[in-house]
Amino acid sequence: MTGWLLKKIVKNGGEPGAHAAIGKFAGITGIVCNALLTAAKLIVGLLSGSVSVIADGVNNLSDAASSAVTLLGFRLAERPADRDHPYGHGRYEYLAGTVIAALILSIGVELGKTSLQKIFRPEHVFVTVPVAIVLLLSVAVKLWLSRFYNSLGGHIGSETLKASAADSRNDVISTLAVLAGCAVTYFFDINVDGYVGLAVAAFIVYSGIGIAKDAVSPLLGRRADKGLTDEIVRIITSHDKVLGMHDLLVHDYGPGRRYASAHVEIRADEDVILCHELIDKIEREVTEMTGVDTVLHYDPVVTDDDEQNRAMELVGSVVSGIDPEYTMHDFRLIREAGKKTLEFDISVPFTSLDRRERIKEMIDEGIAESGGDYETKIRFDGK
């Protein structure tokens, strides 16, 4: 059904602008479905006096509000780049996710307070057939919404829609808990309404925290997907003249707005013009094959300097002896004013960056013990 709706509503599914169109379609669908569920649950909840049913209805109200924020986020995210925002406005979609999380958390806390009051001051609950029907209908609708969001989120690579899919799946669990509480009250005449409401509220808060983490992470500069970086590395290193690459950085400015930069190593004795043309060709290939706008820096590598090669082998052995995870690149032997300096970069785990001075001391000691008479200038990268 999702595929059929997609073809009917989104006419340009494979063209530029499809991301925003699909996101807005999902937002409108979520608003309509959750608004209907909210009205039905609030009506039967108020008539039965069940705080857990009302809590579940308010949870759907928060979902409707979340869908509205999603719709607004996709609308703002599709705005084109301008002078003040040269990379576009795609991160509005991530901001929408943080607002959704804040709404969910605030509603969960308020429902928790109401449920606690019901626990300490319980009131009689009237469980009726309409209550059960509404809850069962809600489970069916939320199961469909979860698959719907997940399908569209996978289609356009949207973390916001995938978060909505997870939230809908969580709603199924909370509604089933409310239904179980109503069954206990109906068959055993035990009032567990406040406790079930409190459990639902706790579940809502837990869900909100998870959504907040997922929404904030890309805004803070989350590491790019490993599959994407591996593909970029494969494309670049597939060319015969490329000796290696390093310092790959991928910046995410919103879905469909990713930019990458990297250093590409090529023999220093190659024709500079041909190297420039090769770099341009690789940039185009990466962009065409991954959708990531790419800028590459040409690093000429001297390969016919015997002393530099021996020094590089020595330092490489010392570095790997300190920790096999450490890797070296951008190695240079600088001869100047009777002094020899080894300049190079070392990539270490982020947890080791605070040990930079000690690592440099260990490298210098290892070079000296091996008979090398060099000064070192080391730059550290985190990985």
Image (cartoon, helix red, strand yellow):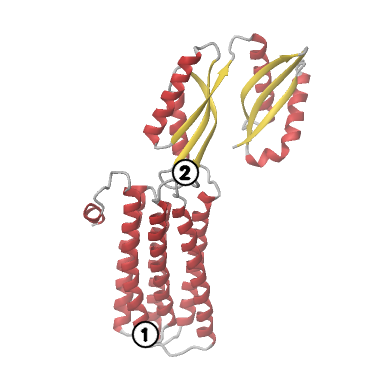
Q: Quadrant of the N terminus?
A: bottom left
Q: Residue 88 — which label?
A: none
Q: Quadrant of residue 343?
A: top right
Farthest front residue?
Answer: 83
Q: Quadrant of the C terminus?
A: top right
Say which element carries label 2: loop
Residue matched to label 1: 186
How many discs mark residues in the rendered view? Answer: 2
Q: Give the amino acid at mark 2.
A: Tyr
Residue at 49% from the left image edge and 12% from the top image edge: 271
In space, the residues marked 2 and 1 are separated at their CA atoms by 58 Å
Residue at 24% from the left image edge and 50% from the top image edge: 11
The mark lying in front, picked from 2 and 1, is: 2
The picture places residue 254, in percent across and down from the top left corner, at 45, 47
Q: Give the amino acid at mark 1.
A: Tyr
The picture places residue 378, in percent across and down from the top left corner, at 69, 28
The picture places residue 361, in percent across and down from the top left corner, at 77, 29
Depth check, front residue: 336 or 131: 336
Q: Is residue 212 visible?
A: yes
The picture places residue 9, in percent across and down from the top left corner, at 24, 56
5 versus 234 height, above or below: below
Left or right: residue 69 versus residue 115 is left
Say which element carries label 1: helix
Q: Earlier in the sequence, mark 2 or mark 1?
A: 2
16 versus 237 height, above or below: below
Q: Is residue 151 visible?
A: no
Residue matched to label 2: 87
Depth check, front residue: 262 or 46: 262
10 Å crowding of disc 2: few (<14), some (14-19), many (20+): some
Q: Quadrant of residue 318?
A: top right
